[in-house]
Amino acid sequence: MPSVRDVTAEAFIAAYSSHLKRSGKLEVPIWVDVVKTGTHKELAPYDADWYYIRAAAVARHIYLRKHVGVGALQKLHGGSVNRGNRPSHHRDASGSVERKVLQSLEKIGVLEKDTARGGRRITVDGQRDLDRIASAIVEEQRSAAEDDE
């Protein structure tokens, strides 16, 4: 059975974010339309579904690397701050946004807290859901390749 490792990140994140949006289970905060995702950003995201995309990216990241915390996700989603004519430097993303994404994924049962090592880890049900989405993507790619031939 194909897993998340067998699918490109772009294809998986797009498919899983649309799954999260369709299911309606993911609890989206009311402030997602006005918040910046980090201090290095000038504006809020243009995409109205950015919260679902971030949740899908976080779920994939934790699937691939066990025991991930808020700090690691801040560093992952951070970027360079524009300092005018001075050299740019890295700035971490917003910890509040990362924390709320983790809490939303915990509420739907995809993630759980790892008390022994710290951070979050993926649950058995969450791993099954992510693998099911990945296998659907692989089947879709196979059928598209057969149609081209």
Image: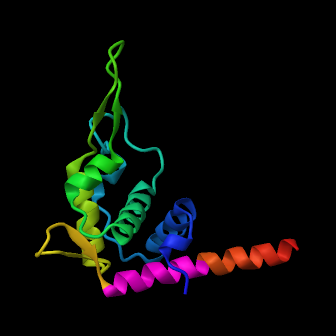
Q: Nearer the viewer, residue 1 or 70?
A: 1
Report if residue 126 lies within the magenta region.
yes
Residue 101 versus residue 124 in the image, above or below: above
Identify the residue at the far right of this view. 149
Whole-percent x, y for residue 56 in the image: 42, 65
Q: Is residue 17 visible?
A: yes
Image quadrant where residue 82 sits: top left
Name the image quarter holding the C terminus: bottom right
Quarter holding the N terminus? bottom right
Q: Position of residue 63 (x, y in %)?
A: 37, 72
Q: Residue at x 55, y 59 (%)?
A: 10
Q: Is residue 6 magenta?
A: no
Task: Report the predominant secondary structure element of the magenta stretch.
Answer: helix
Q: Is residue 90 above or below residue 108?
A: above
Q: Is residue 11 left or right of residue 43?
A: right
Colour option used: rainbow
Q: Residue 46 at what x, y percent from top left?
A: 46, 44
User: Magenta segment, which residues?
Assistant: 124-136
In this view of the protein, can residue 41 be seen by the observer?
Answer: no
Q: Residue at x 26, y 42 (%)?
A: 92
